Amino acid sequence: MTGTPPTSTRTDKGVRGFELDIHVAFSQPLPEAQARAALLALDGLTVDLYRPHPSPLHADPAATPDPAAGVPSARLTGPLRDPEAVRAALAALLGGPARYVEVGVRGFLRSAGGQTEWMPWRRNQVLPRAQVAAVTFEEGVRFVLE
């Protein structure tokens, strides 16, 4: 990613539409720098790295995630610019650190307060990891490559 990576803070309020939504689960938790490096091919998307909660059974607002625990998965969202580039990046991830990838163009509604509501997927399609070329970017269809 060039310059400053996009953050998950959205400024466009009262907007609805469709965005590329990708969830990547790594084969094993990766250090943050390695996880970000693995996602570099998906340039221009907002990246949210998921980390294990420090205390999953007891919510403690003062608790902070353990940076040594690694990043087990990530979510990327943003506009679909080049479908072929996205397919190439998905193939690279599936040939490397990814255990599985979920990808699709998902509907959303962003309220005037900035809260994003994601629409449910209309259909799910499971494909073998070698069939990345079969991914179409239909609105509301999620492809699971495993």
Image (cartoon, grey):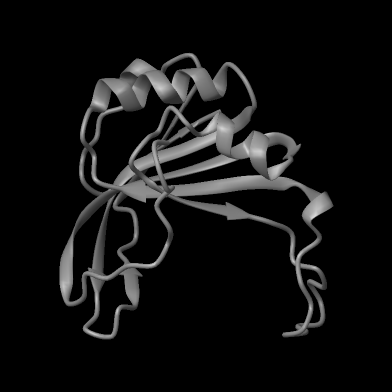
Q: With 115 as the anchor, is 19 left or right in this view?
A: left
Residue farthest along the front direction in this orientation: 3
Q: Nearer the viewer, residue 43 or 118?
A: 43
How far across and down, in percent of the image, does residue 33 sit?
65, 39
* Quarter in which the C terminus is drawn: top right
Q: Nearer the viewer, residue 104 or 122?
A: 104
* Quarter in which the N terminus is drawn: top left
Instruction: Classify 7 as above or below 5.
Output: below
How far across and down, in percent of the image, does residue 74 sit?
56, 47
Q: Quadrant of residue 51?
A: bottom right
The residue located at (62%, 46%) in the rendering is 73
Q: Nearer the viewer, residue 73 or 37?
A: 37
Q: With 95 as the anchor, is 2 left or right in this view?
A: left
How far across and down, in percent of the image, does residue 55 sit?
82, 73
Q: With 7 as the anchor, is 68 left or right in this view?
A: right
Q: Quadrant of residue 43?
A: top left
The residue located at (42%, 23%) in the rendering is 89
Instruction: Classify 110 as above or below 86.
Output: below
Instruction: Classify 33 as above or below 67.
Output: above
The residue located at (25%, 73%) in the rendering is 110
How far across and down, in percent of the image, does residue 90 sit?
44, 25
Q: Nearer the viewer, residue 137 or 110?
A: 110
